[in-house]
Amino acid sequence: MPERILVADDQTVMQDLLTDLLEQRGAEAVAVGTAEEGLEMISKSPDAFDLVILDLDFGDGKMNGIAGLEAIKKINPTIPVIILTGKGTISTAVEAIKLGAQEYVEKNFYIEENMDLALTRLDHLIRATIDNKRLRREREFYREELKGQYNIVGKSRAIQQVLEQIKVVAPIPRPVLIRGERGTGKELVAAAIHQNSDRKKGAFITINCAALAEGLLECELFGQEDNAFTNASFREGRFVLADKGTLFLDEIGNMSVEFQQKILRVLEYQQFERVGGTKTIKVDVRLLAATNSDIEANIDAGKFRADLYDRLAFETIWLPPLREWKADIELLCYHFMERLAAEVAGIKPKKLTPETLDYLNAYHWPGNVRELKYVIERVTYKFDGGTIFPHHLPQEILTAYSHSDDGQSLSGRLAQVEKQILTDAYEQFQGNLEDTARELNVPLDSLKQLMQKHHIGEEMAR
Ligand SMILES: Nc1ncnc2c1ncn2[C@@H]1O[C@H](COP(=O)(O)OP(=O)(O)OP(=O)(O)O)[C@@H](O)[C@H]1O
Ligand SMILES: [Mg+2]
């Protein structure tokens, strides 16, 4: 992610010059003309910027740079600040450094070169700010996710067994391999294992191994030493960040065999070197891994190391696809609606009609719980009214339902029998609804609804 830099200077020429320079370096620059404006942006969103470049003098009647600096540092003491100084303000610049500014750059003929140097000197700090910010966000996300035990929802045996397995395996300081189709809750289970272990006070750090090119993955995992020669800047590495905690390696199915060797080494000895470094670093990390690929096939094909598999799969938790625990669909729907309502003001949970549930049950859910979650969230915010009817559901679910009357499921078979009885009676009384209702002993209204549901009488009515 590129760094976002705030430039506060009252001269547009200076704003343009600095913005150009920053954008050339790949940063995203936002320029404002007064310290007040900058301050307002930072107080609205203290993490919005990774660096502030602040002029000292904004003219009469305006807040000056020193006051601006003090206010900024009060809101977020970790934002690095570079002060711009004009002629005769060097002594003020010294004061600014005392107040926590990292650098000052004089506005003179060499401003571009000097700014470039200052930025390079601060690179380390800016990276660290960005890293910390990202980690803070991730941790916040997990804190939310981990709130309460209600996270993993499901009363069916399949899910209860998973919960039982989590409880048993969580306190054992060994790797766990979590397997299952996409969207079945692998990450949720990893977080639950961490939360149920005695490492729960430590960090829960995740990394998606499929999302990064291998060189980057290596830097992210093991860290990287400063190297002026290759322009590489320091990175702590997630193994270190997860020290005394848990590291979750997501989607491990496609790492190269050489890289698997490196992971194996850390697993065995809990030590490694940073990229570009020679010092051996020791850590105490519990590893969890997840995949939805066919590891056994990959092992046979020589794409996955059997010894790494053996290590990771000290214990394996298999997550069932949602189609195998459809009995919990209703529970999950209400859970997701309640969570959305708690998150977004003005949204209330809705009711699902029995027909809507029939439709949800008939669908095969290739994207599993995640797909169900998104479907339910979408219909909850999109439509007015307190009830979700089948016609609110997305097309693929409607289509699946119309093809699902194959007489296989209990509900499908019952529906077929119901339709047959209705059709027979309807024909017997030649389309007279009152007589049909009396014969079947159902109220007329209910009969009409049932007829509609099974599309009976529609041809005759035409
Ligand atoms: N049993 C469950 N109860 C409540 N929410 C669940 C359950 N299982 C999954 N979820 C929710 O479904 C979504 C997908 O879960 P998660 O990200 O853990 O799946 P995953 O198996 O890691 O998927 P992928 O393979 O695509 O990465 C998340 O929002 C998660 O909170
Ligand atoms: Mg996942």
Image (spheres, grey):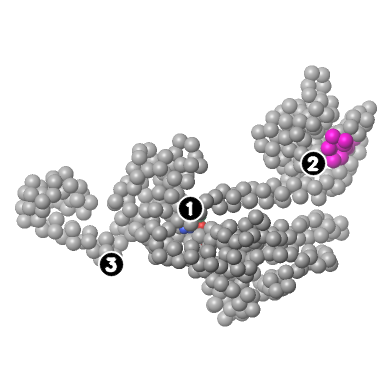
Q: Which mark is residue 246?
A: none
Q: Which residues are magenta?
A: 97-107
Number of the front mark, 3 or 1: 1
In the picture of the structure, the residue carrying the numbered disc 1 is 150
Mark 1: few, some, or many residues within 10 Å (few <14, many ≥20)?
few
Mark 3 / mark 2, whichever is N-terminal = 2
Q: Residue at x 33, y 53 (%)?
A: 357
In the picture of the structure, the residue carrying the numbered disc 3 is 408
The image shows a total of numbered marks equal to 3
- Identity, as a three-letter code, of the amino acid under mark 3: Gln
Q: Residue at x 53, y 67 (%)?
A: 168
Task: Looking at the picture, tell me which residue is in the foreground, 16 or 224.
Answer: 224
Task: Looking at the picture, tell me which residue is in the foreground, 189 or 414.
Answer: 189
Please state if 203 lies on the left or on the right of 452 as rendered: right
Q: Secondary structure at mark 1?
A: helix
Q: Position of residue 225 (x, y in %)?
A: 81, 60
In the picture of the structure, the residue carrying the numbered disc 2 is 80
Magenta span includes 99: yes
Give the Cα separation between the discs numbered 1 and 2: 41 Å
Residue sitting at the far top: 61
Mark 3: few, some, or many residues within 10 Å (few <14, many ≥20)?
few
Q: Position of residue 290 (x, y in %)?
A: 57, 66
Q: Secondary structure at mark 2?
A: loop
Image marks 3 and 1: residues in contact by CB distance under 8 Å: no
Cβ of mark 3 under 8 Å from ligand 1: the answer is no
Task: Looking at the picture, tell me which residue is in the foreground, 192 or 77.
Answer: 192
